[in-house]
Image (cartoon, rainbow, N blue to C red):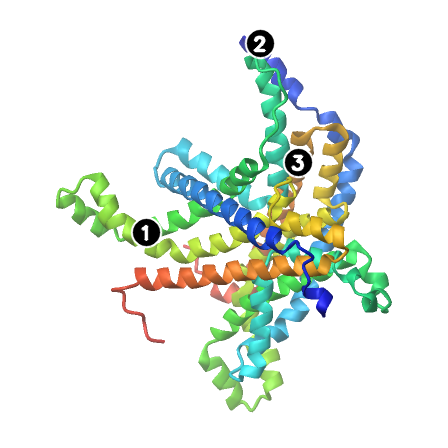
Amino acid sequence: MGSLIDLKGYGWSILVEGTALTVEVALASLALSVILGILGAAAKLSGRRVLMGIATFYTTLIRSVPDLVLMLLLFFGGQTLINWAAPKFGYEDYIDIDPFMAGVLVIGFMFGAYMTESFRGALIAIPRGQIEAARAYGMSPLLLFRRITLPQMIRLALPSFGNNWMVLLKTTALVSVIGLDDMVHRAGSAAGATRQPFTFYLVVAVDYLVLTTISVLVLNWLARRYDRGYARRSP
Amino acid sequence: MDGGTLQASILQFFDYQVIIDNWQLYLSGVFVTLQLTALSLILGFVLAVPMSIMLTSRKPWVWMPVWLYVYCFRGTPLLIQLFLLYYGAGQFAFIREGFLWPFLREAWFCAIIAMGLNTAAYQAEIFRGAIATTPRGEIEAARAFGMSPFRLYSRIILPSSFRRALPAYVNEVIFSLQSTSLASLVTLIDITGAARIVNSRYYTPYEAFLSAAVLYLVITFVIIWLAGGLERRWNVHLARPTS
């Protein structure tokens, strides 16, 4: 049992630095996915055929292709595209994509599609009458969004937003495949050097479990906060 | 640069010959993907049905171990679960000397076990939700008929729950199909594995991975189409009358 817990000096590297990198990738991707999700939901509800078509193509494609395939396509494909295009604009050196940037762009782009669906569902669930009433009061579109739409959208989108976040967090494990030195990658190196793969992958598993547990607690707290004023229906 | 050279460069950009030359690799990849999906789903289903029944129990010693299992498998990435089994099992001498080692040494076997255990946790949650929403009247009527608990489950609760669980279950089938792509990271040559080989051999990422994406897309649509047919058959009594 002693050898199972002994991390042979890799503890700090995996548990602190690796976890920090994983959380950074996750939060940066979340920010990108929320921006894309708002744009996507706005496009789907815009009523303009071209915008709706692009948004539908985006969400359908992303949701029917595995994460790993998308990640490899966008990482290797992006690298090829940049190095194919750059000389045509007079840039001659070989360009290497930074794995952190690539990971954030890929995960953010993927979960933008899931966020689009969450936000679209929340927006259409807000009663029309409230928006008409706010307009009748003479609210500007910005004030209407800030006072009427946004607070309710957050409440309605929170359950599926939380679900997306949990899946996103676990998807960050894939960035180790494109070479980012996150906790999975560090655990892999430590496993190779010490010949104790079980120990180090178990550490990573527990680490993820702690992160998802913290997420559940925060999301439940947020849900209680935004549900204030809405009586829970008794079963 | 002018329009003519741009068009020519875009045409050069795609090289379909690479895919035509490697169609057999992709085809065998499709078989591996379908095999992994089907076998892990079957394993998951066999585990999930008793687990979902245990989850609806009122006794803590019955539902708590299953709840913990579901919590751990849903709270950690499948990639880590797969690595733990495939790379991790060999760390222990008693496993290396045990009778299961000839299987645990094989990536194919480990992938099916890891994916089966993983999808079992998600399927158990789906079935638990469906069992919990069984109309009380159906259960009371079955009890009034004097059915034993086994009959009650096998004739009333489970069939009616499976019908209600179908839409969520189809989603889980599609998620399982997609998660089999991780098998390519433990040396298996499924669709993604074939694409990775083609990419590393010819350095043609678009041709390699877009072909893989199209194959997954086609399989996904076939699953949705089959599920639609199944849903119409099973839930014929729930269909809304069309005008």
The label nearer to you, 2 versus 1, is 1
Question: Which residue lies at the image location 17% right of the left edge and 49% below the top edge?
Answer: A133
Residue A50: x and y in percent read 41, 31
Residue A104: x and y in percent read 52, 40
The label nearer to you, 3 versus 2, is 3
Q: Is residue A120 left or right of residue B152?
A: left
Label 2 vs label 1: CA separation?
48 Å
Residue B240: x and y in percent read 44, 60
Against A16, is A42 above or below?
above
Looking at the rendered image, the quarter that the C terminus of chain A falls into is bottom left
Instruction: Tell me which amino acid carries mark 1.
Output: Met
Specify the farthest residue to the front: A9
Please tell me how crowded label 1 is: few (under 14), some (14-19), or many (20+) other residues with Cα within 10 Å: many
Against A161, is A60 above or below?
above
Question: Toward which corner of the image does residue A229 lie, by quadrant?
Answer: bottom left
Q: Please state the total of marks drawn on the protein image.
A: 3
Question: Which residue lies at the image location 66% right of the left edge and 24% below the top edge?
Answer: B14
The disc at residue A153 is: 1
Callouts 3 and 2 in the same chain: yes
Against B44, is B14 above or below?
above
Label 3 vs label 1: CA separation?
37 Å
Please tell me how crowded label 3 is: few (under 14), some (14-19), or many (20+) other residues with Cα within 10 Å: many
Query: Residue tagged by mark 3?
Result: B209
Q: Chain of mark 1?
A: A
Instruction: Tell me which amino acid carries mark 3.
Output: Phe
Q: Is residue B58 left or right of residue A185?
A: left
Against A107, is B157 above or below?
below
Question: Which residue lies at the image location 53% right of the left edge and 64% below the top edge?
Answer: B235
Query: Residue tagged by mark 2?
Result: B4
Q: Chain of mark 2?
A: B
Label 3 vs label 2: CA separation?
28 Å
Looking at the rendered image, the quarter that the N terminus of chain A falls into is bottom right
